[in-house]
Image: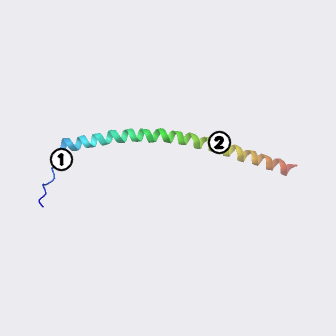
Amino acid sequence: MCRMPAKRATVQQVKSDIDAHIDICAVRYESIEKEMRGVNARLKRIESIGIGACGSIFLLLLSLVLK
């Protein structure tokens, strides 16, 4: 079976492919960044609740010890 050699891409075609890839990646990274901002906000809220709970437990134990 005889195969035809693959057609070589021109510099313009390669540049076009790279530019398209850059555009697609920019949209993806923007989406990922937006999602990460939401995750960071949730983690900050959970962290605040944890710090408040630890502080409350510490004060409760301190009041029990000092009685």
Q: Quadrant location of the N terminus?
A: bottom left
- Is the residue marked by circle 1 packed among few (<14), some (14-19), or many (20+) residues within 10 Å? few
Image coordinates of residue 40 in percent, x first then y, are 54, 42
Numbered circle sitting on residue 62: none
Return the disc, 1 or 2, that comes first in the chain's sequence.
Answer: 1
Q: Is residue 3 left or right of residue 52?
A: left
Closer to us: mark 1 or mark 2?
Answer: 1
- Looking at numbered disc 1 in the image, what kind of residue is underneath it? Ala
Image coordinates of residue 61 in percent, x first then y, are 80, 50
Question: Which residue is at a point 42% across and 38% down the rendered structure image?
Answer: 30
Task: Specify the farthest residue to the bottom.
Answer: 1
The reply to whether callout 1 and callout 2 are in contact (CB within 8 Å) is: no
Q: Is residue 55 left or right of residue 12?
A: right
Question: Which residue is at a point 22% across and 44% down the rendered structure image?
Answer: 14
Q: Nearer the viewer, residue 63 or 45?
A: 45
Question: Which residue is at a point 11% across and 59% down the rendered structure image?
Answer: 2
Numbered circle sitting on residue 9: 1
Q: Is residue 9 left or right of residue 44?
A: left
Which residue in the protein does label 2 denote?
48
Q: Secondary structure at mark 1?
A: loop
Image coordinates of residue 62 in percent, x first then y, are 80, 49
Question: Which residue is at a point 63% across and 44% down the rendered structure image?
Answer: 47
- Looking at numbered disc 2 in the image, what kind of residue is underneath it? Ser
Q: Is residue 49 left or right of residue 41?
A: right
Q: CA distance from mark 1 to mark 2?
A: 56 Å
Image coordinates of residue 43 in percent, x first then y, are 58, 44
Q: Nearer the viewer, residue 5 or 33?
A: 5
Task: Specify the farthest residue to the front.
Answer: 1
- Is the residue marked by circle 2 packed among few (<14), some (14-19), or many (20+) residues within 10 Å? few
